[in-house]
């Protein structure tokens, strides 16, 4: 996505360690690109590769003492009760 084509952006403030701030300024100067552009690009790359935690279970079979059928029956009773409350 070309950043110049974005219609809306939100302003934010970042607190960077001094060394990182100096490195960003230097890279911006040498590349001729704005610091904000470099930060957006770095964040986009980082977030695109970020692994999100996956649940170990969605509930069915996670509890040896409670079967999926029992869970469904309990949910049905509770939803019915909530509808009539």
Image: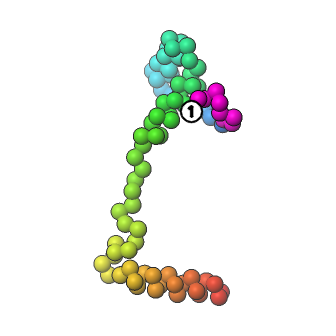
Q: Can the viewer see residue 14 in this picture?
A: no
Is residue 34 positioned above or below 82 on the image? above
Name the dominant secondary structure of the magenta segment.
loop
Location of residue 50 in the rendering, given as x and y in whole percent from the top left corner: 42, 43
Q: Residue at x 55, y 13 (%)?
A: 32
Location of residue 62 in the rendering, given as x and y in whole percent from the top left corner: 34, 72
Residue at disc 1, secondary structure: loop
**Quadrant where the C terminus lies?**
bottom right
Q: Nearer the viewer, residue 3 or 46?
A: 3
Location of residue 31 in the rendering, given as x and y in whole percent from the top left corner: 51, 14
Please identify the quarter of the rendering in which residue 57 is found.
Answer: bottom left
Residue placed furthest toward the top: 30
Q: Can the viewer see residue 63 in this picture?
A: yes
> Bounds of the magenta span?
1-9
Residue 5 part of the magenta-drawn span? yes
**In the image, 65: left or right of 40?**
left
Is residue 18 positioned above or below 81 on the image? above
Is residue 75 positioned above or below 56 on the image? below
Residue 21 part of the magenta-drawn span? no
Is residue 83 positioned above or below 9 on the image? below
**In the image, 12: left or right of 30?**
right
Residue placed furthest toward the right: 7
Q: Which residue is mark 1?
A: 1
Q: Nearer the viewer, residue 41 or 10?
A: 41
Please identify the quarter of the rendering in which residue 61 is found.
Answer: bottom left
Q: Residue at x 40, y 85 (%)?
A: 70
Q: Residue at x 69, y 36 (%)?
A: 8
């Amino acid at each position: 996505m070309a950043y110049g084509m974005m219609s809306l952006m939100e302003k934010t403030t970042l607190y960077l360690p001094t060394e990182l701030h100096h490195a960003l300024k230097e890279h911006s100067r040498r590349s001729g690109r704005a610091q904000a552009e470099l930060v957006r690009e770095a964040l986009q790359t980082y977030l695109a590769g970020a692994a999100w935690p996956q649940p170990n279970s969605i509930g069915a079979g996670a509890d040896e003492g409670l079967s999926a059928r029992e869970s469904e029956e309990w949910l049905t009773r509770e939803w019915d009760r909530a509808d009539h409350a």
